[in-house]
Amino acid sequence: MTGSLVIVGLGPGNPDQMTPEATAAITAAGDFFGYFPYIDRLSLRPDQRRHASDNREELARAKAALAMAASGGRVCVVSGGDPGVFAMAAAVCEAIEEGPEEWRNIDLSIVPGITAMLAVAARIGAPLGHDFCVISLSNNLKPWEVIEKRLIAAAEAGFVMAFYNPISKARPHQLGEAFDILRRHLPSSIPIIFGRAIGRPDETIRTVRLQDASADMADMATCIIVGSPQTRIIERDGKAPLVYSPRSDRGGSA
Amino acid sequence: MTGSLVIVGLGPGNPDQMTPEATAAITAAGDFFGYFPYIDRLSLRPDQRRHASDNREELARAKAALAMAASGGRVCVVSGGDPGVFAMAAAVCEAIEEGPEEWRNIDLSIVPGITAMLAVAARIGAPLGHDFCVISLSNNLKPWEVIEKRLIAAAEAGFVMAFYNPISKARPHQLGEAFDILRRHLPSSIPIIFGRAIGRPDETIRTVRLQDASADMADMATCIIVGSPQTRIIERDGKAPLVYSPRSDRGGSA
């Protein structure tokens, strides 16, 4: 009677960046749960059903998907990028832990995907080329003080940083505050990369120095990479510059 | 006359986890440079040429690939996982910066791939479900003191951590030292995940508590994920436990 639940990473948005494993998992499932724009990306058969919901409803979505799987459905939860990086895999695990015992018996699998920072980095060089941190700037689910502490720790230890969820209508000020914190702890010349909709027709990518970075350069679909003091920019005639963080890593000193 | 260079991420090793974009880039190229086991994974046509080399020779390999592209070749450099995460993209950028001006004119592109930590995380739940750091434990190219500083900073700020290059014949002691450092800064009960060859026939994955973690649980092909004090283990009858780091993130306190 118990069905199955697969959590699938769709990648950044370009169908050529979605794995064959993800495509096969979608073909095999009957019911699809996810945030509207991810559900909209799917090409489904008439016998497959869409259950789209808003992006603030991860836990409710996870519970609905688990309930359907527990009653025998072949259920798929979709995430943009990778489901394990600020996406649905943690919400499903949380729902299983809090939910009825039978949810632990569901045949659960997770299909990884290309997460946004990897697509942004690939487009511009190798900014994640040495040790890095990955931080969500959303304080919906954690105190801002935790984010502030992590930004300072990462800056002082010489990590490159990737920011997810940098800004939203409900959180207009966090990104500007994050840049202010970084300016107190890092050289003003370090490169900041703003990548949006990478691999899709409306792709944009832009690199500025920290001194010139501002929150209006991003929206909720932007992934931001903050270089370390060692990150370098290679200018090229007639081509976009390359940005990379060298493998030989002296650890934070400029 | 100038040719092209594409740096391709092959993913963790399961062909179903390699993107169509990567497959197309391999089909289009003529000469292939990379570490032996990655070159061995490729199914090439008779007109495509293999140039395999050892894993300590990244910069020499990058220069050889760039020289061939500059003289008109359609060249492909392959990396396991993602080329931007402790792999060939940074080495190629470094070679371009140091090399002749004409190397900047080469048509360069980078194809992202599923990096090891995403495949390991997907196999066990969502251990990377909140903010995390990604650290290479190799001190071939950075001082051990830098690694030590970053481990302490990451532990004190409540990050989950993923370790690449945890151990090798030339570096037998680093991983044990890293665990010793973590035991001084984190609760001994936090989960440590050892994932090896995920998606391949010889895949292994194992979770222990920090108090029981030891260096002999890993080899150079292992990716290790160190939970935060908030990371949870969900036991399941007759199934492997799930490990996840909750989205609601109180920031390092146990």
Image: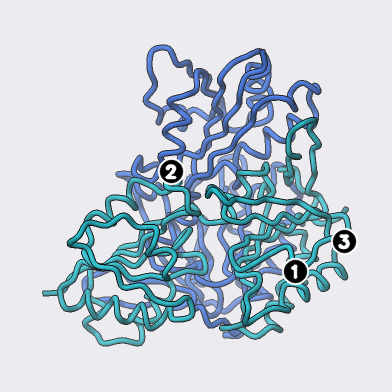
Chain colours: A cyan, B blue
The answer as to whether the residues below labels 2 and 1 share one chain is yes
Discs 3 and 2 lie in a common subunit: yes
Instruction: Give the vertical position of B95 relative to B237 (above or below).
Output: above
Instruction: Classify mark 3: helix, strand or loop.
Output: helix
Do residues under tags 3 and 2 come within 8 Å of each other at their CB atoms?
A: no
- Which residue is at 65% across, 80% downward? A171
The residue under label 1 is A215
Q: Amino acid at mark 1?
A: Ala
The x and y percentages for residue B53 are: 56, 24
Chain bearing mark 3: A
Q: Residue at x 65, y 85 (%)?
A: A143
Q: Position of residue B137 (x, y in %)?
A: 63, 52
* CA distance separating discs 3 and 1: 12 Å
Find disc 2 in the rendering and name its residue: A16
Q: Which residue is mark 3?
A: A211
Task: Name the amino acid type tagged 2.
Answer: Asp
Q: Is residue B113 above or below residue B72?
A: below
Nearest the eye: B140 or B105: B105
Which of disc 2 and disc 3 is earlier in sequence?
Answer: 2
Q: What residue is drawn where x is 38% and y is 47%? A: A19
Amino acid at pointer 3: Gln
Residue at 31% in and 73% down: A51
**Numbered disc in front, either 3 or 1:** 1
Point out the image quarter for the C terminus of chain B: bottom right
